[in-house]
Structure formats: structure tokens, C-alpha cells
Amino acid sequence: MSGVPQRVEPAPGELGARILYMVLFGIVFWIVSWILAVTAVAQLLIRVLSGRASAELARFGAGLARYAAQLVEYLTFATDRVPYPVGELPGR
């Protein structure tokens, strides 16, 4: 079985909620994208200045990337699982 989540059509009454969630999570995705960009630049600077990457920033970036993936799956209708904070926080 592929790693792509199964797509399930929402009930007609749920479409309004889906639209609202998509607008809100679109804004969240935009913010997460900027945080990821800042994290990547910070990690690059740390690597250049100290010679090694920060393990803490790497873990933070990996978690943020998993959350961004969850947002993208929801926004592109790949899944109906609502992202955090409405749904579950993505696991490791």
C-alpha cells in the first residue's frame, strides 16, 4: 500500500467547516513556511560558524516539517484528518 493517505469525500454539511479550516490552516501554513525558512538559515549560520549543525534545531525542523506535511495533505484534500490544534499533533 502506498504512503498516500486515503481520500474520503466529506458530507455536504461539512463543506462549510472544511472551507473555514482551509482558510485558517492556509494562514498557519504560511507562518510555518516562514518559521522553517528562519530555522534553515539559523542552522546554516550555526554550521558555518561552529563547524557542526545544531541537533536541537534539527529536531525542531524535522517536527515542523512533519506538521507542514500534515497541513499540505489537508489543504490539498489528500486527507480529511484535520491538523493540530484541532486534530492530533503529528507523531515522530
Image: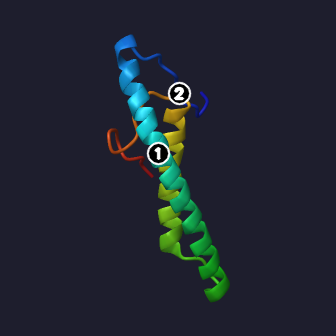
Residue furthest to the left in view is: 86
Marks 1/2: CA–CA distance: 16 Å
Q: Which residue is mark 2?
A: 77
Residue 78 versus residue 42 in the image, above or below? above
Q: Is residue 87 left or right of residue 56?
A: left
- Residue 41 screen position, x and y as percent: 61, 71
Residue 48 versus residue 90 in the image, above or below? below
**Nearest-to-viewer mark from 1 and 2:** 1
Residue 7 versus residue 21 in the image, above or below? above
| Residue at x 45% of width, y 47% of height | 28
| Quarter occupied by residue 34 | bottom right
The N terminus - image quarter: top right
In the image, what residue type sits under mark 1? Ile
In the image, what residue type sits under mark 2? Phe
Q: Which mark is residue 55?
A: none
**Local secondary structure at mark 1:** helix
**Local secondary structure at mark 2:** loop
| Quarter occupied by residue 12 | top left
Residue 9 versus residue 26 in the image, above or below? above
- Residue 76 screen position, x and y as percent: 56, 31
Q: Is residue 58 left or right of residue 87?
A: right
Q: Which residue is mark 1?
A: 27
Total numbered circles:
2
Residue furthest to the top in view is: 12
- Residue 23 screen position, x and y as percent: 45, 36
